[in-house]
Amino acid sequence: MKSQSKSGISPMTRLLAACVTWVLLHAAPALAEGEKIQVLAYAQPPFMELRHDRPAGLAIDILNMLFQRAEVDYSILFLPPKRAYVTALSEPNNCVLAIERSQAREALFQWVSPILITRHGFYSNLTDNYNIRTLNDAKPLVIGSYLGSGVGEYLEKLGFNVDLTSSNDLNIRKLQLKRVNLWASDTVSAAVIINQSSLPIKLEHVFLTTLRAMGCNLSTSPTLVERLQNELKSMYQDQSIRQLYRNYLGQDADWLSN
């Protein structure tokens, strides 16, 4: 005769129920990891842009390598910056690329970081000789920058005389016409513009380094986010990131290995 507990449930039934519960609990993370991640980007060439309706740019190159190496299914959708941020904040399995990881934002997302390490520098005409070795050396000079870049606003807060325009092209024109003394830009954007047009412009001094990350919705599988973070770390360690930067900066990307 089969044994039963006082509740009328046999030990075998209890064992089967326990096994089913264990399988469900341990299968949940795997199912979550199998879900597709939607990465929300916004136009900021040469880091992120649509070229012939295809995502392109340095941050996109890094993202593609990262997800392929981590074997995570994903798609990329371009939105205006604010909408990309708000959507990643509110929608499951959405991540926003690439934003600054600040103290105010830290608890709002799960982070994969740093996707981009961006250096900002002062540029001058080849014929100029300002001998800028520190940030303060540039304070007496007029600095050209463009609205929305962040770096112009940063310099203004420090008391610099900043001439803000709507684009980098206008800054370059003003620099060449000597209407501004220096042009402040991130080194990737500057390198692309200078090399494409063979401009007689040189880097004077790097004065700021910023980190940008991918922020993922809080409901995203922590195991999946950890896998992406570990793979990103591996990409820095094996110099894959430096090689991608070299496609834009040439040998000037070697600072990434320091």
Image (tube, rainbow, N blue to C red):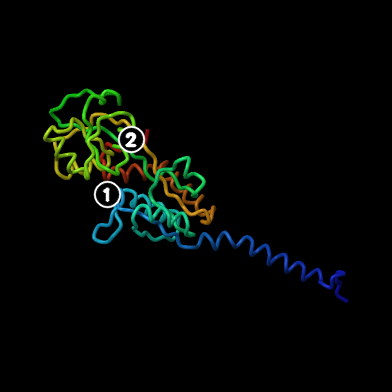
Whole-percent x and y of residue 126? Answer: 15, 30
Which is more foreground, mark 2 or mark 1? Answer: 2
* Amino acid at pointer 2: Tyr
Secondary structure of the residue carrying numbered label 2: helix
Figure quadrant of the C terminus: top left
Figure quadrant of the N terminus: bottom right
Residue drawn at x 47%, y 59% as measured from the top left: 91
Q: Earlier in the sequence, mark 2 or mark 1?
A: 1
Residue drawn at x 81%, y 72% as measured from the top left: 9
Q: Residue furthest left?
A: 177
**Residue where numbered disc 2 is placed:** 154
**Residue where numbered disc 1 is placed:** 45
Asked if residue 76 is positioned above or below residue 237 in the image, the reply reads below
Asked if residue 177 is positioned above or below residue 73 in the image, the reply reads above
Horizontal side, residue 200 vs residue 80: left or right: left
Whole-percent x and y of residue 36? Answer: 45, 62
Horizontal side, residue 162 vs residue 200: left or right: right
Asked if residue 164 is positioned above or below residue 80 in the image, the reply reads above
* Amino acid at pointer 1: Pro
Q: Which quadrant would residue 22 be assigned to in this image? A: bottom right
Secondary structure of the residue carrying numbered label 1: loop
